[in-house]
Image (cartoon, rainbow, N blue to C red):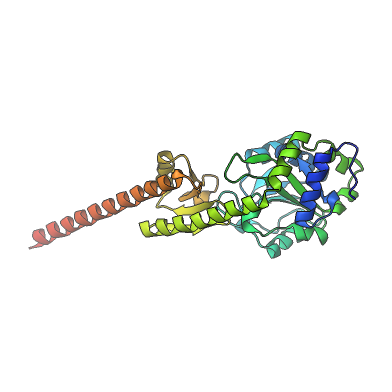
Amino acid sequence: MNRILPTQTTEQAGLRNAVALKDAVEFESVILFEDSSLFIEELLKQYSVSNSRLLALSPCRAEIVMAADRADIDIVQLLAEDFTDKVSETDIIFLENPNRSNGSNFSLTELKSLLARIPDGLLLIDEYYFDFLRISAAPLLKELNNIVVLRYFNDWLGASTKDRGYALVSSFILKSKSKNFSSQFYNSSMSRISARICYEQFGRSRQRNNQLREIQTRCLQLAREITDIGLMCRLTAADFLIVAVDSAEIAAELQKQNQLNLETIHNQNRLTNLLRCRVTLTEADDELIETLRRAANTKKKISKAKIRTDQKIKDSKAVHVT
């Protein structure tokens, strides 16, 4: 039987035990949190040293920026392809797998390669879309000592519990740091009521799997429709599609027309002509298609008008020469 810490309730221990069984990790490796920003802040404080930096290979959301600021650690924003060998062994790397903005992902081999560059640092992996991707760094906890995996209790068709979640932590991390390291996190764990709500949600695996299948099926349908319209579309291991348009200006204008489930990838300079199209399984999906169809039709009209104008210019030049 798992030992319940004095500061933990039965609900918290039950939720940790359910997570440990599902992810095949030790009970002690599961740490619950009520607020992801506060948890990451405490993690950075506990694990960073004087010259540590937070190297972000994914766009830094507000909670990451706030956590780093409160922990007094500098953030260096990098693109994965720009990642060089100039990395300190004590740096902390943050990444999303898959990326919440564009759906790109790292393989386990790539994650191991990153870990090899920071033997005295930490790799912090946000697996917000784990249920879709099904590629997790959790198995690496048994063989590597400097890795923390973040997960969240998400309801894909309802209100997202983006702040409540849990971390999967190597037992070596808990044992190698100060005696207060683990207890500090357990003491600031999520509330009893939150643990009960998350436990009930966590147990609805069949319902959640059905929802995921519906979203994935709908993604395929929408991808076909978008391709038929004449736009380039990419599927992701998430609840959104990536659609390419001609320019960042067009992407921004389309977002204004459809604010429900269209977002520009404004925080990554090389991807400004891409749209992040969220799938909702509601009428908003049909509105999305209509928005993209209008954009494609407008482009066709402009192209035809340009062809006619060019032809007139050619004709006038031919007459003039004659």
State the residue lying farthest toward the bottom.
109
- Residue drawn at (59%, 49%), measured in percent from left and top? 100
x, y percent for residue 75: 68, 43
- Residue drawn at (85%, 38%), measured in percent from left and top? 8
- The quadrant where residue 139 appears: bottom right
Q: Quadrant of the C terminus?
A: bottom left
Which residue occupies the foreground of this view, 265 or 174?
A: 174
Give the number of callouts: 0
The vertical placement of 143 against 68, above or below, is below
Which residue occupies the foreground of this view, 281 or 65?
A: 281
- Residue drawn at (20%, 53%), measured in percent from left and top? 309
**Residue 89 shows up from this direction:** no
x, y percent for residue 58: 63, 50
x, y percent for residue 172: 87, 53
The vertical placement of 145 against 70, above or below, is below
**Residue 213 shows up from this direction:** yes
- The quadrant where residue 42 appears: top right
- Residue drawn at (74%, 34%), measured in percent from left and top? 70
Which residue occupies the foreground of this view, 157 or 69?
A: 157
